[in-house]
Image (tube, rainbow, N blue to C red):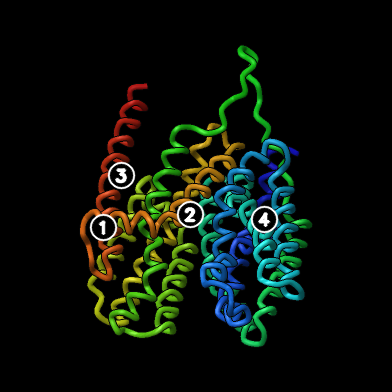
């Protein structure tokens, strides 16, 4: 197929919908989260930490299997990896709706987590693989928006199903079937991204660059501090007497809504901010933490959540595109994204422990100490990165003029 025909095929609306639908699979895990309380009641002898494994195992598996997904792209196509992931997620999700004790469900979560880890980087890789230029920017933003919306819808669906019976929340994984049919019939298969050997040395060409690893490390650090918003908001609201779990859910929903809107607008945002998109997004999240630190009412917390969502909704697609472009060649974008996703998972997992170490080192005892650390880190980091990006851009322009 010629490049022109391929471009026409990828501009097809159904191809775009199929590519974006992969993002829905990432958020199916949120359907069982509202059922954790009911599951704890059903297994009163189980420790709370054991119950929480049902929620944390997929995230831990993501760290490993995101890297596996990147390696697999050298042997099978992205579409086939997504297909394997969907099968694992279905097999690991549905059985717990009908049979099994807690130990069985934990084992099934490992199976589900393997599929979850495979599909997570592929949701971005498939967009980077099929689309280019402004269309890629637009669809990467849409992918982020679709994910934000799916997280809210799936969590609400899981809560409704769990209200009848906690096992029913696992029936939500039946949604994988229509998503799978759409992907199988409408998503193009672009083949294997096999590395080539250079004729001179016989050594395989490199797939990622040092920039890929630098960006992955930056994402790890950003997630260490920004994840404190999700983990601390409920405790802050309760300890400061600003509300209860319902108010915490409201703040998180507002944050998700803001991220959804900015995801839809990302194409225009990236066109306006250009190379400063990522630093500006990080600065926005940092300023959101400043608002959250001084918020003394639900209204101010909601304002902080809106600003946070704006930064978050811009940062995710922007950094994903930057990571994809950091690959040694466009066909290796999936490998670079897999490394970035794995680093993101590590950052989220170590966030509570690293922030605790920092608090104790700095002797910070306030309820919102984690947010103080986050605000300072993100604002300083964004300013430094803006200066570095500006210097690099100026140097590149001078080189081009010289040439």
Disc 2 from disc 4: Cα separation: 22 Å
- Disc 2 and disc 4 in contact, CB within 8 angstroms: no
Crowd class of label 3 (few under 14; some 14 to 19; many from 20; radius 10 Å): some
Q: Which residue is painted at 64% across and 39% down in the image?
A: 71
Q: In the displayed structure, would residue 9 be above or below residue 253?
A: above
Residue 115 — which label? 4
Q: Which residue is painted at 38% across and 61% down in the image?
A: 311
Q: If you read the primary sequence from the N terminus, does the residue marked by circle 3 or circle 2 appear first?
A: 2
The residue carrying mark 3 is 385
Q: If you read the primary sequence from the N terminus, does the residue marked by circle 2 or circle 4 appear first?
A: 4
Disc 4 from disc 3: Cα separation: 35 Å
Q: Nearer the viewer, residue 356 or 59?
A: 356
In this rendering, which labeled residue sits more in front, label 2 or label 4? 4
Q: Position of residue 250 (x, y in %)?
A: 43, 80
**Quadrant of the image for the C terminus?**
top left
Crowd class of label 1 (few under 14; some 14 to 19; many from 20; radius 10 Å): few
- Disc 3 and disc 2 in contact, CB within 8 angstroms: no
Q: If you read the primary sequence from the N terminus, does the residue marked by circle 1 or circle 3 appear first?
A: 1
Residue 360 — which label? 1
Q: Which residue is painted at 65% across and 54% down in the image?
A: 114
Q: Position of residue 169 (x, y in %)?
A: 66, 77
Left or right: 191 in relation to 349 = right
The residue carrying mark 2 is 317
């Amino acid at each position: 197929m010629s490049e022109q025909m391929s471009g026409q095929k990828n501009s097809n609306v159904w191809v775009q919908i199929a590519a974006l639908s992969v993002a829905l699979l990432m958020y199916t895990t949120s359907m069982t989260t509202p059922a954790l309380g009911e599951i704890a009641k059903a297994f009163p002898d189980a420790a709370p930490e054991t119950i929480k494994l049902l929620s944390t195992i997929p995230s831990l598996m993501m760290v490993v299997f995101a890297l596996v997904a990147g390696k697999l792209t050298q042997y099978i196509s992205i579409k086939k990896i997504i297909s394997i992931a969907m099968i694992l997620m279905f097999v690991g999700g549905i059985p717990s709706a009908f049979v099994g004790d807690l130990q069985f469900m934990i084992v099934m979560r490992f199976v589900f987590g393997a599929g979850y880890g495979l599909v997570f980087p592929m949701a971005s890789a498939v967009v980077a693989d099929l689309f280019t230029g402004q269309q890629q920017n637009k669809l990467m933003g849409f992918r982020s928006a679709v994910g934000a919306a799916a997280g809210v819808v799936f969590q609400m669906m899981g809560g409704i199903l769990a209200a009848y019976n906690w096992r029913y929340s696992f029936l939500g994984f039946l949604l994988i079937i229509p998503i799978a049919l759409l992907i199988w019939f409408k998503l193009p298969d672009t083949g294997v991204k096999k590395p080539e050997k250079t004729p001179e040395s016989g050594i395989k060409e490199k797939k990622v660059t040092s920039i890929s690893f630098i960006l992955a490390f930056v994402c790890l650090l950003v997630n260490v501090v920004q994840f404190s918003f999700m983990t601390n908001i409920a405790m802050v609201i309760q300890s400061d007497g600003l509300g209860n779990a319902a108010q915490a859910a409201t703040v998180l929903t507002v944050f998700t809504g803001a991220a959804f809107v900015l995801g839809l607008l990302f194409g225009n945002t990236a066109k306006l901010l250009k190379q400063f998109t990522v630093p500006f997004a990080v600065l926005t999240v940092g300023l959101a933490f400043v608002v959250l630190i001084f918020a003394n009412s639900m209204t101010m917390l909601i304002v902080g959540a809106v600003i946070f969502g704006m930064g978050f909704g811009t940062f995710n697609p922007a950094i994903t595109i930057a990571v994809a472009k950091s690959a040694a060649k466009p066909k290796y974008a999936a490998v670079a994204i897999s490394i970035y996703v794995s680093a993101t998972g590590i950052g989220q997992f170590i966030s509570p422990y690293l922030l605790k170490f920092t608090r104790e080192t700095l002797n910070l005892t306030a309820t919102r100490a984690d947010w103080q650390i986050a605000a300072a880190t993100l604002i300083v980091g964004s300013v430094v990165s803006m200066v570095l990006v500006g210097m690099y851009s100026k140097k590149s322009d001078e080189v081009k003029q010289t040439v």
